[in-house]
Image (cartoon, rainbow, N blue to C red):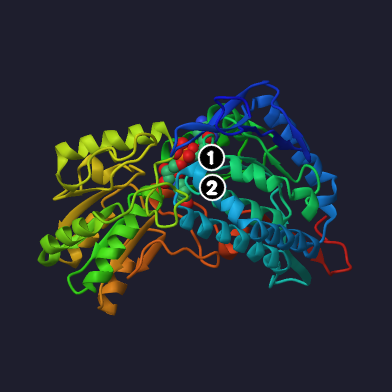
Amino acid sequence: MPKGIKSEVRTYQMYIDGKWVDSASNQTSAIIEPATEEVMAQVQAGSAEDVSRAVAAAKAAFETGPWASTTPQERGRVLFRLSEKIRQNASKLAELEARNCGKPIVEAEFDINDVATCFEYYGGMATKILGTVNPVPDNAVSLTLKEPVGVVGMITPWNYPLLMATWKMAPALAAGCTCILKPPGVTPLTALEMAKWLPEVGVPPGVLNIVTGSGSICGTALVQHPDVNKIAFTGSNAVGKVIVKQAADTVKRVTMELGGKSPNIFFADADFEAAIDGALFGVFINQGEVCSAGSRILVQRSIYKKFVEAMTEKAKRIKLGSPLERDTKMGPVVSKDQYDTVRSYQEIGKKEAKMSIGGGRAKKFAKGYFIEPTIFYDVDNRARIAQEEIFGPVAAVIPFEDEKDAVKIANDTPYGLAGAVWTRDLFKAFRTIKAMRAGIIWVNHMQLTYVEAPWGGYKQSGFGRELGPWGIDEYLENKQVHINLNEQPIGWY
Ligand code: NAD
C-alpha cells in the first residue's frame, strides 16, 4: 500500500437492473467513519437519470420480467435464501454497520439478526396472502384478490440502515412488488453489500435496485416519477411533509414512518432499579438516534429527586468507546451534521432547564463525533428540548403529580410514535395505555421490537404500519371481482 494511505478505500457502484454501474453523474461521494472522521468508502452520487434507469428496470421486471410470473412459493424461497446469506455473513455486516453508523457492535449484531429474521418472516408470509369471498346478496361470486401495488420507491434513514430498508424490501418482495431502494446518504454500505447476493439467491434483474445519492436529487426523482406506484418512507417529519406534498401530483400511495418525542412514564410504584435502567436504555440506546427514543422521561413527583440522582449516577458509568469494542455502550453519533445538531440542543437545554450530567463533546476522544450522554431535569414540557426531536443522547426529565397529569404531559406533543409506562399496578397501566395517543406502548420495558407486531405512529409521527401482516398489506392492492352466475341477460333495456 502506498505510503500515507492507512487503509484501502473501496468505491461502490450502484445496483441497477442486476448490474453494478457507475452513476450517470460520474461523481462519487465520500462515506465518513464517524469514530475516526476518515473516509471509509466512496459511493456513487446518483442522479435523476440513474433513478429513471432503475425505475424503468423495476417497471419491466414487474410487468414482463420473471418476477411477474413467480409463484408465492418461489418468492418465499428467494427470501429464505437471502435470510440465510445474511446469517452466514452476519458478523461482517454487523461490523460494517457499526463502523458506518458509529453504533456499538453488540447493537449492530442485533440489527443484522433482525434483518435476517424479517426476510424469513416475510418469506413465510408470501404463501399466506389471502383474498376473500364476499357475501354479496346476489346470485354471484364476489371475490377480493390481493395484488402487488407495483413499483415501490423506498427511502430510508441512517440510524438502522439495513433494518429500516428490510422492513420495506421484505414485505414488498413477498407481495410481488419490484423496488428501488434509495438508502441514506451517509450510511448506504450494508445495503450495497447485501445486493451482491441478490443474483445468487434468485432475485431477477430489475426486481430490487439500489440507487445511492442525495435525498434532494435521487429521493425527489423517485417521489416525482410517474412510474413509481408507491413510496415507503422512513425519516424526519420535515422531509416526510415534502414527500407527501410531492407524491400528490402522481397520486402515489405513501407510507410515512416519521419522528417522535416519546414519553417514558415512571409511576412511584414502579420497580426502582428496573426503572432507572429502563429510563437510560430508553433514551441512550443507539446514541439516542432512535425514532422511538424515550427522550421525555416523566417521573412522579414523590420519587423524582431520588430518580434523577440515581439516573445520573448510573449514566456516569455508560461506556463510550469505539463501536467495535464489545463493552462499548455508546459510540459516536453518525455524522458531523448530526453532531452539530445535538451539540446545539445541548446548549439550548442549558438555557431551558437544569443539567445533571453531560452537556458537551466527550473529551477523551481526539477524533470522532462523540457526545456525552446528557440529562436535563426540571424540564418544562413546553421547552424546545421537550418538544423537538433531537435524535441524540439528550434526555429531558419532567416531573408529574398524578396519573391525569402524566397522560396530559405525555400527549402534549405533535408526535405520537411510542411511549412507555412503568408501574406494578395493572389497572393503572391499562388506563394509561388507553389514554396515550401513540402507535406503540411498552409496559415495564422500552424499545423491544418484534417482526410479528405492528410498527408505526399516530399524529405527526406518520401513517401506515410496518411489520407483521400490517406491513405486507401496505404493498397490496385489493381487487374486487364480481362473477355473475345468472345466465339470463341483465334485463334492463
Ligand atoms: P431524513 O428525513 O433527513 O432522511 C431520510 C431519507 O430521506 C434519506 O434517505 C434522505 O436522503 C432522504 N431525503 C432527504 N430529503 C429528501 C427529499 N427532499 N425527497 C426525498 N427524499 C429525501 O431523516 P434521517 O436524518 O436520515 O433519519 C432520522 C429521522 O428518521 C428521525 O426523524 C427519526 O425519528 C426518523 N425515523 C423514524 C423511524 C420510524 O419507524 N418511525 C425509524 C427510524 C428513523
Answer with mark 2 or mark 1, whichever residue precedes in sequence.
2
Image spot of residue 374 (x, y percent): 25, 47
Question: Pointer 2: what residue?
Answer: 97
Image spot of residue 67 (x, y percent): 81, 51
Mark 2 lies on a secondary structure that is helix
Vertical side of 17 occupied by 286: above or below: below
Q: Which residue lies furthest to the right in this view?
A: 487
The residue at the point 69 percent across, 33 percent down is 13
Q: How many numbered discs sit on the rendered protein?
A: 2
Question: Pointer 1: what residue?
Answer: 187
Under mark 2, the amino acid is Glu
Q: Which mark is residue 278?
A: none
Is disc 1 surrounded by few (<14), some (14 to 19) or many (20+) residues within 10 Å?
many
Give the camera-side residue of 385 and 222. 385
Image spot of residue 38 (x, y percent): 49, 31
**CB contact under 8 Å: marks 2 and 1:** yes
